[in-house]
Image (tube, rainbow, N blue to C red):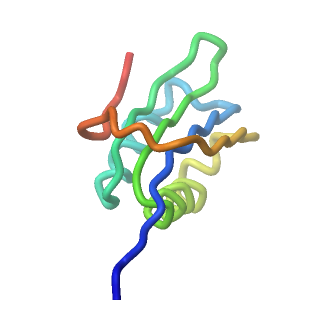
Amino acid sequence: MENHTTRSQVKVFYEGHVQGVGFRYSVLSISRRFEITGYVKNLPDGRVEVCAEGDDRELNEFLHAISVSHLRNYFTDTAKSWNAYTGRFQSFGIRQ
């Protein structure tokens, strides 16, 4: 039986006290437990953007891991959008 997996891109914007608290480095650390690619970066408006691509199951588990980590103490709101998989990322990293 063939394994049919759906690949997607998810973008999540985290609001709250998410800059200057090691948020990006913690997301990077969490990302290493999953087979995903993409980036995490601070935005000028004070939010943090996470853009990740991979298998839908991996992406959901990655987002869940963020939501149950110590990072939940820093964000007050999230906005999430699912998009088409692009395959443009080689790894997951921090963008400036």
Q: Residue at x 48, y 62 (%)?
A: 6
Judge whether 68 appears above or below 87 on screen: below
Along the line of sight, which residue is nearer the eye, 71 or 48? Answer: 48
Query: Please, is residue 64 above or below residue 86 in the view?
Result: below
Please indicate whether residue 86 sits to the left or right of residue 90 in the image: right
- At a point 75% along the width and 40% down the height, the residue shown is 77
Q: Would residue 15 be found to the left or right of residue 32 on screen?
A: right
* Rendered-image quadrant of the N terminus: bottom left
Q: Position of residue 27 (x, y in %)?
A: 43, 44
Q: Seen from this angle, which residue lies furthest left?
A: 90
- Front-lying residue, 90 or 85: 85
Residue at 34% x, 39% y: name it.
Answer: 87
Residue 48, image x and y in percent?
Answer: 56, 28
View extreme (right): residue: 77
The location of residue 50, given as percent across then percent down, is: 51, 36
Residue furthest top in the image: 44
Query: Residue lying furthest bottom in this view?
Result: 1
